[in-house]
Image (cartoon, grey):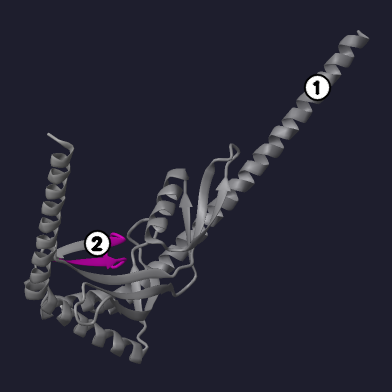
Amino acid sequence: MSLLDNLRNEVEIKESEHAAHMAEREAQQRYYDERLKQPMLQALTYFAEVVKNLKFLDMVTPVGLPIAPDGKSLVAMEQSGYEFIYDDAKNPLRMDIVCECLVSDYQRFFVSNLDKVERYTEFLDGMNLAYHRKTELDSKYDIRNAVFELEGPLKVGVTIKASPSDRAIYVYLRNLEAESEKKYQFSPEKLDADLLERLGRVLLRKDFRNELAMQVEAEKIERDTQLRVAFEEMRIEREAEAEAKMFSKRIAKLTSAIKAKIRVARSSG
């Protein structure tokens, strides 16, 4: 095959790939216009009004999040600062409803041993939650325990994305469930008024606010008690270690004195 024939073949292949790409783009645009656009506009209208009202009311929601080291105890926080961000008012492909949770009280946790300290550190880093960690080392300079002070804020949000290529709508929940981020896939017709209402309630943690507030307060009292006990145990352990070291020094000093007397006795004898 001549050079010119090779070039012609490559041109035909490239033109064919370009035509297929353009055809797929047109198909995706048609699918967006026919199936995705209306539910995305409905979602945009709904959340624009929700956030507008929340900002006007300066809504602050008390919440309890299971982000203590045991993975169960709730941490008291306050959720506020709602914002609504979208890419296109007429043909939206993505929208984000974001807010943040502030640590409402001084939150401090005692975590024992290296493995638990590393796991909790990884967990907080995964949530992108700011914290201060003060570690205590043993005689080998390994981590014996640590005290974590949660600082925050914790970023929270709902993201809705239309995907013409996948013929679907994706919903991402950030720091609203057990995982730091949860992804859901819906067909376009499923993004209806009922689903939008449920997403709004999940965002505001509407259905569980009173129960969580009571549980948070009870668990905070229990946690403070456990923290005091842990610090008392640490104090007793350190005092015991100090006494053991002093006793060892006394024994060593006494042994040295006895050996010195024995040497003197032997030399004089």
Is label 2 in a helix, a strand or a loop? strand
Q: Kindly identify which numbered label has been placed on residue 92.
A: none
Identity of the residue furthest to the bottom in this view: 56
Tag nearer the camera, 1 or 2: 2
**Residue designated by label 1:** 258
Please give the count of numbered marks on the rendered protein: 2
- Quick check: 269 left or right of 163? right
The vertical placement of 49 against 154, above or below, is below
170 drawn magenta: yes
Q: Residue furthest top?
A: 269
| 39 versus 134 height, above or below | below
- In depth, the one of 2 and 195 nearer the eye is 2
Q: State the residue at coordinates (37%, 88%).
A: 58
Going by the numbered disc 1, the residue's amino acid type is: Ile
- Disc 2 target residue: 182
- The quarter of the rendered structure image containing the C terminus is top right
- Residue 157: which quarter of the image? bottom left
In the shown orientation, is residue 139 left or right of residue 176?
right
Q: Amino acid at mark 2?
A: Lys
Please state the extent of the stretch shown in magenta in the rendering: 169-182
Image quadrant assignment for residue 56: bottom left
Image quarter hosting the N terminus:
top left
Q: Position of residue 127 (x, y in %)?
A: 37, 61
The numbered mark, 1 or 2, whose residue comes first in the sequence reads 2
Residue 14: image x %, image y %?
16, 50
One can see residue 218 in this view: no
**Which residue is nearer to you in this view: 43 or 182?**
43
Distance from Cα at disc 1 to Cα at disc 2: 71 Å
Name the residue rendered at 13%, 64% in the picture. Answer: 25
Q: Position of residue 192 (x, y in %)?
A: 10, 77
